[in-house]
Amino acid sequence: MKGFTSTVRTIRYYFPLAPAGSVLCFFALLLLANSFLTRDPYEIVLSVTALFVLAMLAFLARIQADQLSKYPIQWDSSQPLVAGSKPSMQRLTGVVVRPFMGFRLHFAVQGRLTVGRRASLFLSQETIASSASPGGEIPVRLAFPLSGLFHAEGVLKVGDIFGLTRAQFGGSYERHLAVIPAAFPEAISVRVEATERSEEKQSQMNSDEEKYYMREYAPGDRFRDINWKSSSRLSQLFTRIAPVAQEQTKIIAVEFRNYREDIPESLESIMHLNHLKSWILSFLRVVKEANQDFQFVVISGKGASRLETKDDIERFAAELAELTYQSVPLEEVAAPPTDEIYLFTTPYDRQLPAALASYPQKRINLFRTVSPRAPGSHKRRSLALFRLREQLPIPGLWVFRRDFALEQPGVDHSRARILGEEAVEAQVITLA
């Protein structure tokens, strides 16, 4: 089996015809065979000419492929991939040779985008360029309808402008790339006030007072801020630091509840989770932008993450992209000692009532997606998997499964304050 696979790969690597060229070659051979039977000279000339043109184009493509294979062309995939309507930009580097006139360089990327448990999309996208920038770079545009983990393979080819022949060269570029969630469809307006438990702050002040409230004297410090008592004891000048420096660091507790029964995914379940990923990521970015000193502890089914900087949030975005539904958390994580917590959940979270009861001492703020058939007045969000104007990926059977009887878990409004609630209506395709 392994030898057969290797043979197929070799044939695919050296086969000189593109799909359109293969069709033309078939009809040219058919016409040539018929011309010998009918003894029609026009058919002979036409068929031989078509075959000669194909052979010449294939020969020229192979010459260029052998020439380009000598140069270290690389796929620079360092730029993040983002789901949504706008394509993400990456690049090819080291393209120092321009193809012959009438030929172009092709970079084909294909692979599976994992979007859920046993749910994926097959994507195939191709970048075509006649020449590179003066720096030897070619932009690569990749578009993704959903966030997830993209298992990609890229190959380089040289082909004619008519799309009849192509010659592959070099090895394949294999990547496992996180496609981070798109930005939330609209601006998020939320006021967050982080407060730590008073006993936690008092304990921290007592244990770390010297560490947080004094440092060595530096030129430019005010003379009246010198701590003369400590300086005389340690024979070195120390400066007092205002207590506000410690108080400005606040902790925000956030829980991303990616929970669902271990059953096959559906169109609705995938769209709800993808929308919730965009929601929590935009929430983290907006709160951090408004409050630079705020830090987050984000709890999910895979554990807890401490996010202190904007870079931490962007790194978490890649982890968030790979999260799928889980039936139970991988490990029990204690919530940080804060008076307030923000929960993000979907209607598939049957454990939500128990989760609300597990935070008896906290103020609970809830963001959740709901079924479009749920009672009450909710903001309606129509989300489509595909857009007709874009290149369509190939989904799995999960796209045909629907959750028409999706029940909404109850929420004790005396325990939780709902800050955001959106009814997600999942569609397969839209014309927009």
Image: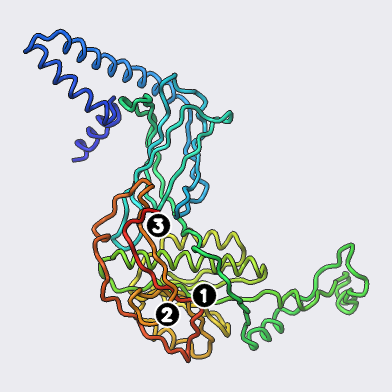
Residue marked by disc 1 = 254
Q: Amino acid at mark 1?
A: Val
For the C terminus, the quadrant is: bottom left
In terms of sequence position, does the residue under pointer 3 or pointer 2 come before the other?
3
The nearer-to-camera label among 3 and 2 is: 2
Residue farthest to the right? 223
In terms of sequence position, does the residue under pointer 2 or pointer 1 come before the other?
1
User: What is the number of the mark on residue 377?
Assistant: 2
Q: Residues within 10 Å of mark 2 (few under 14, many from 20)?
A: few
Q: Amino acid at mark 3?
A: Leu
As displayed, is residue 328 above or below residue 26?
below
User: What is the number of the mark on residue 146?
Assistant: 3
Q: Secondary structure at mark 2?
A: loop
Residue at 45% in and 65% down: 277
Residue at 24% in and 35% down: 6
As displayed, is residue 215 above or below residue 396?
below
Residue 330 makes an appearance in the image: no
Q: Quadrant of residue 60?
A: top left
The spot of residue 22 in percent (x, y) is 23, 27
Q: Residues within 10 Å of mark 1 (few under 14, many from 20)?
A: many
Residue farthest to the front? 431
Residue 305 makes an appearance in the image: yes
Q: Secondary structure at mark 3?
A: loop
Q: Amino acid at mark 2?
A: Ser
Q: Secondary structure at mark 1?
A: strand
The nearer-to-camera label among 3 and 1 is: 3
Q: Are marks 2 and 1 in contact (CB under 8 Å)?
A: no
Q: Quadrant of residue 116?
A: bottom left
